[in-house]
Image (cartoon, grey):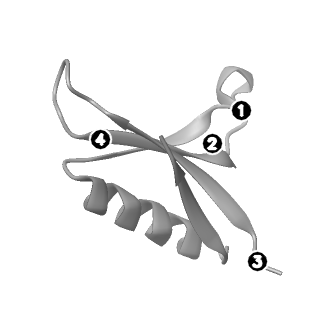
Amino acid sequence: MNTVFKAWIYENTEHFGGYTGEIEGVNINTNIEDLKDTPVEFYANTKAELLQSMICFLKSQGKTGILRVVK
């Protein structure tokens, strides 16, 4: 059975353009209590670059499955 990772993608139109994304359930690994449950954020100029960096990150963590994009 495959694992499904939900990726939330936001278009940044106001300040600097590009895209921001986060993956549900992928949080910052830290011992700082205030940041412990904060999602890892990804930034890119295009949606394709953003998705590619998210996929590379998941693979680097040894995760496999399906990346589902949610707007």
User: Dot 1 surroundings within 10 Å: few (below 14), some, or many (20 or more)?
Assistant: few
Q: CA distance from mark 2 to mark 1?
A: 6 Å
Quadrant hosting residue 53: bottom left
Question: Is tag 2's residue or tag 4's residue first in the polypeptide sequence?
Answer: 4
Q: CA distance from mark 4 to mark 1?
A: 24 Å
Q: Would residue 63 appear left or right of 48 to someone viewing this image?
A: right
Q: What secondary structure is marked by label 4?
A: strand
Per the rendering, the mark at residue 36 is 1
What kind of residue is marked 3? Asn
Q: CA distance from mark 3 to mark 4?
A: 27 Å
What kind of residue is marked 4? Tyr
From the viewer's side, name the closer residue of 16 and 37. Answer: 16
Question: Is tag 3's residue or tag 1's residue first in the polypeptide sequence?
Answer: 3
Task: Write down the residue under mark 4.
Answer: 19
Vertical order, 15 against 3 (above or below): above
Vertical order, 12 against 43 (above or below): above
Question: Is tag 3's residue or tag 2's residue first in the polypeptide sequence?
Answer: 3
Task: Write down the residue under mark 3.
Answer: 2
What kind of residue is marked 1? Lys
Q: Would residue 27 appear left or right of 13 to someone viewing this image?
A: right
Q: What secondary structure is marked by label 2?
A: loop
Mark 2 and mark 1 residues within 8 Å of each other at the beta carbon: yes
- Location of the N terminus by quadrant is bottom right
Quadrant hosting residue 58: bottom right
Instruction: Please identify, in this view, whether the residue under mark 4 or under mark 1 is nearer the observer.
Output: 4
Residue at left offset 20%, top offset 25%? 13
